[in-house]
Image: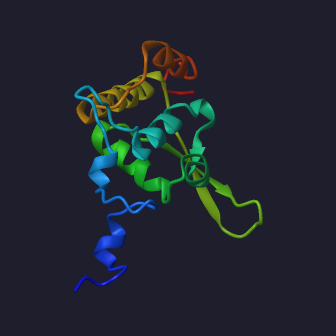
Amino acid sequence: MVKKNHPAQVAHSDIRGIDSTPADHIKQSANHTKRTPKKHRAFTYIASSGINGVTENEILFQCRLSSGRNYVSEIERETGITFERLDEKNPDGIGSHYRYRLACRKDASQLLRLINFKAKEGNYPGLSQVQVNDILSLYSDNATS
């Protein structure tokens, strides 16, 4: 006796009642590249912030991520660069948060190399040379900016 609307049957049938599995709906070519990860977007956003830097909240809102400081810490660990940390009061006057800033073009260049390395390693699109040049133009040559 077959039960009607058994969960196993419902999960593998579409609204027309045709049996299918999720794999039937996914067609991938051999040269398919992965979707760009959130971490890539966060690293790119941080690099693109220029001399103004970026706050944890900006990373949260712009990249749809939590705990922006984790991404900054990971960049520091993997590249050996140190972000400048500026303590800012919150707009409501309660507490403060950090603004993270790359000190110079050399540090930005290291971050951009990391971004493109991870993209190549993860098989998703990295930054073009035009994008790299645009981002690098946001930074001064010296480390005392």
Q: Residue at x 22, y 28 (%)?
A: 30
Q: Is residue 106 left or right of residue 120?
A: right
Q: Residue at x 32, y 80 (%)?
A: 6
Across and down, in percent, residue 21 comes to 28, 57
In the picture, residue 140 is in which quadrant?
A: top right
In the picture, residue 10 is in which quadrant?
A: bottom left
Toward the viewer: 62 or 99?
62
Toward the viewer: 38 or 42?
38
Q: Quadrant of the N terminus?
A: bottom left
Does 49 appear above or below 54?
Answer: above
Q: Is residue 84 left or right of residue 58?
A: left
Q: Residue at x 50, y 54 (%)?
A: 65
| Residue 102 showing in the rendered view | no
Q: Residue at x 27, y 30 (%)?
A: 29
Across and down, in percent, residue 7 comes to 33, 78
Across and down, in percent, residue 52 comes to 63, 36
